[in-house]
Image: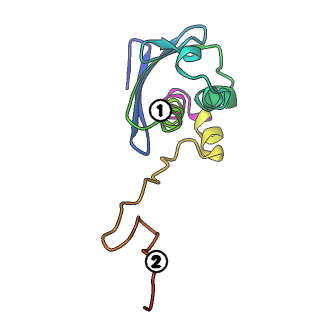
Amino acid sequence: MATKGVIHTIGKRKTAIARIYLKPGKGKITINKRDIDDYYLRATSKMIVRQAFELTGNADKFDMIVNVVGGGLNGQAGAIRHAVSRALAELNPENRTVLKAEGLITRDSRKKERKLYGQKSARARYQFSKR
């Protein structure tokens, strides 16, 4: 959804939901009103957020404002990457083929399986004893 040069998209991963606003700029990324370097201390999380920009060659062409809720920092980074991929695909159809090949446009639907009754957790059983 684009209004006045600003592209708004939503990305999801596990229980994290990211809403991003992409506008032409110099590559500044703000997450929950904090700079990306203040929000993420791990280099891998920063790399995940910037991955779609680097694949399409748009690293320093857009400023991004992100509101992200839910999940942990890794899930949030994945949600942001999903939203950025959607925005770049919407912006230019050529980007879609590059991002689709890397699997960034597809929503990763894996979630934690619920604990089942009569068991310790989703998969683990209570120890069996004959006597």
- From the viewer's perspective, is residue 4 above or below residue 107? above
- From the viewer's perspective, is residue 99 above or below residue 1? below
Report how far apart the C-alphas of labels 2 and 1 lie in the structure.
Answer: 43 Å
Contact check, label 2 and label 1, Cβ < 8 Å: no
For the residue carrying disc 1, how many other residues have a C-alpha within 10 Å: few (<14), some (14-19), or many (20+)?
Answer: many
Identified at 56% across, 34% down, the residue is 93
Q: Which of marks 2 and 1 is nearer the N terminus?
A: 1
Identified at 68% across, 27% down, the residue is 54
Discs 2/1, front: 2
Amino acid marked by disc 2: Gln
- Which quarter of the figure is the N terminus placed in? top left
* SS class, disc 1: helix
Q: Position of residue 66 (x, y in %)?
A: 44, 21
Amino acid marked by disc 1: Ala
Q: Name the residue beneath numbered marker 1.
A: 83
Q: How many labels does the image show?
A: 2
Q: In this view, does 28 lie to the left or right of 8?
A: right
Look at the magenta stretch and give its main secondary structure.
helix
Q: Where is residue 44 in the image (x, y as percent from the top left)?
A: 66, 32
Q: Give the range drawn in magenta.
A: 85-94
- From the viewer's perspective, is residue 7 above or below residue 72? above
17 or 62, nearer to the observer: 17
82 or 111, nearer to the observer: 111
Place residue 47 in its image quadrant. Answer: top right
37 or 54, nearer to the observer: 37
Q: Position of residue 116 (x, y in %)?
A: 34, 68
Identified at 39% across, 11% down, the residue is 4
Q: Name the residue beneath numbered marker 2.
A: 127
For the residue carrying disc 2, how many other residues have a C-alpha within 10 Å: few (<14), some (14-19), or many (20+)?
Answer: few
- Which quarter of the figure is the C terminus placed in? bottom left
* Residue 112 disc label: none
